[in-house]
């Protein structure tokens, strides 16, 4: 398991994130410079959460991404209709080696009174293996979350041969 943040139910203080150089250079990250980015456990409106998890240089048989999130801004419920999560390989192209593996609205279809949730997303091992084999190191799974959503932790569970 590879993770970042602390599973502590969004307890302060805010914890730092690590973002790869390619993630920081992506179009979205350049649009929302550092003062508008968030750390783990940090509330706020219209902020960008950026994190990168290092990928091992070995064959992966299966992978699952997990993120714990809360929809709150400035102490109350937020307008979360524009919050989206994207995971993949920055700069998140539509095709090629550095592409997006998952992109979706963070709270689409959830009941309005649901405040926090843990999201688990299967990640195609074939894409992770292709990326590690065909691109230069270092290798990261990049995570981008935009909006009013607070992040408690992220983790990537990998199974090897």
Image (cartoon, rainbow, N blue to C red):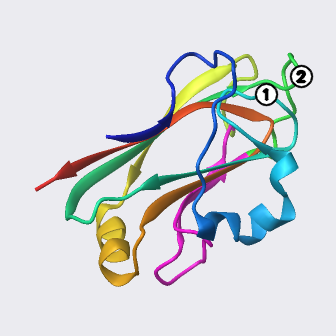
Instruction: Give the residue drawn at x 63%, y 64%.
Output: 23
- What is the secondary structure assignment of the residue under circle 1? loop
- What is the secondary structure assignment of the residue under circle 2? loop
Vertical position of residue 83 compared to residue 10: above or below? below
Q: Is residue 80 left or right of residue 88?
A: right
Spot occupied by residue 44 in the image (x, y as percentages of width and height): 84, 32
Outermost residue, left direction? 161
Vertical position of residue 134 compared to residue 40: above or below? below
- Label pair 2/1, CB-CB below 8 angstroms: yes
Spot occupied by residue 37 in the image (x, y as percentages of width and height): 78, 46
Q: Is residue 85 magenta?
A: yes
Vertical position of residue 151 compared to residue 122: above or below? above
Please identify the quadrant where the N terminus is shown: top left
Marked residue nearer the N-terminal end (2 or 1): 1
Spot occupied by residue 39 in the image (x, y as percentages of width and height): 69, 37
Q: Which residue is under mark 2?
A: 74
Q: Which residue is under mark 1?
A: 43
What range is drawn magenta here? 84-107
């Amino acid at each position: 398991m590879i993770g970042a943040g602390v599973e502590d139910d969004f307890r302060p203080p805010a914890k730092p994130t690590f973002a790869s150089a390619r993630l920081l250079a992506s179009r979205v990250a350049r649009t929302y410079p550092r003062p508008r980015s968030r750390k783990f456990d940090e509330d706020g409106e219209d902020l960008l959460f950026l994190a990168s998890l290092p990928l091992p240089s070995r064959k992966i048989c299966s992978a699952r991404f997990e993120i714990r999130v809360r929809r709150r801004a400035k102490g109350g419920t937020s307008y979360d209709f524009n919050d989206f999560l994207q995971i993949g390989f920055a700069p998140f192209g539509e095709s090629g080696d550095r592409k997006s593996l998952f992109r979706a609205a963070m709270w689409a279809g959830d009941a309005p009174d649901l405040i926090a949730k843990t999201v688990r997303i299967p990640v195609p091992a074939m894409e992770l293996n292709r990326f590690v084999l065909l691109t230069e190191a270092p290798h990261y799974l990049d995570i981008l979350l935009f909006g009013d959503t607070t992040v408690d932790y992220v983790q990537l569970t990998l199974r090897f041969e």
